[in-house]
Amino acid sequence: MFVARIAFLSLLGVVINQSFAGLFLQPDWALAIVLAALFTHSQHWPWLLLIAALHDLILYWSIWASFPWLCLSLLVLWYVDKELGPAVAPRFACMIASCLPLMYMGGGLMQVLLTCLVCIPMWHIAGKQYA
C-alpha cells in the first residue's frame, strides 16, 4: 500500500513538473517524494528505485540523471546505519548528494535547493507514519 501511494504521488509530481515546465522555477517533486520515501522506509528499496528509474526516463530521457546517485546513497545509508545507527545527518547529506545531479541535467542551484526544501517536509510526513 505504501509503495502504491508513493508511485501515485511520484506520478503526480512528474505531471506537475511537465505541466508547469518553463512557467516558473519549481522543484523536482517526484524526486523529493522518492527521496523522502527511501530515507524513511528503506525496506521498500527495489520498488522505490524502480520508481526513481522511471522518473529519470520520463523527465530526463536518461536513466543516469539521479538513479545511480540514489543507488549509491542507499548503499551509504545501509553502511552508516549498520555502523552508527540511524541518524539524520547522513540522510541529509545523502539527500543533498542525490539532488545535485539536477544541476548536470539542466536545472540550477535553485532547483536543487527547492527540491531539498520540499523533500524535508515530505520526509517528516513519511516518518510520522513510521513512528
Image (spheres, grey):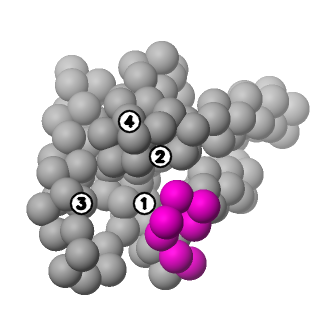
| Mark 1 residue type | Cys
Please report the residue visible at 54 percent of the width from the left and 45 percent of the height from the top. 65
Residue 106 in the image: x percent, y percent? 49, 66
Question: Circle 2 — which element?
Answer: helix
Residue 6 in the image: x percent, y percent? 27, 35
The CA span between labels 1 and 2 is: 7 Å
Q: Is residue 73 magenta?
A: no
Q: Which one is nearer the viewer's eye here, 35 or 21?
A: 21
Q: Which one is nearer the viewer's eye here, 93 or 83?
A: 93
Residue stretch in magenta? 103-109
Q: Which one is nearer the viewer's eye here, 123 or 112?
A: 112
Which quadrant of the figure has residue 3? top left
Please report the residue visible at 52 percent of the width from the left and 76 percent of the height from the top. 108
Q: Which residue is mark 2?
A: 35
Question: In the visual, does 94 lie left or right of 111?
Answer: right
Q: Which residue is mark 1?
A: 119
Packing grade of label 1 (10 A; few <14, some 14-19, many >=20) is: many
Packing grade of label 4 (10 A; few <14, some 14-19, many >=20) is: some
Marks 2 and 3: which is nearer the front?
3
Sequence-first disc among 4 and 2: 2
Q: Which residue is mark 4?
A: 57
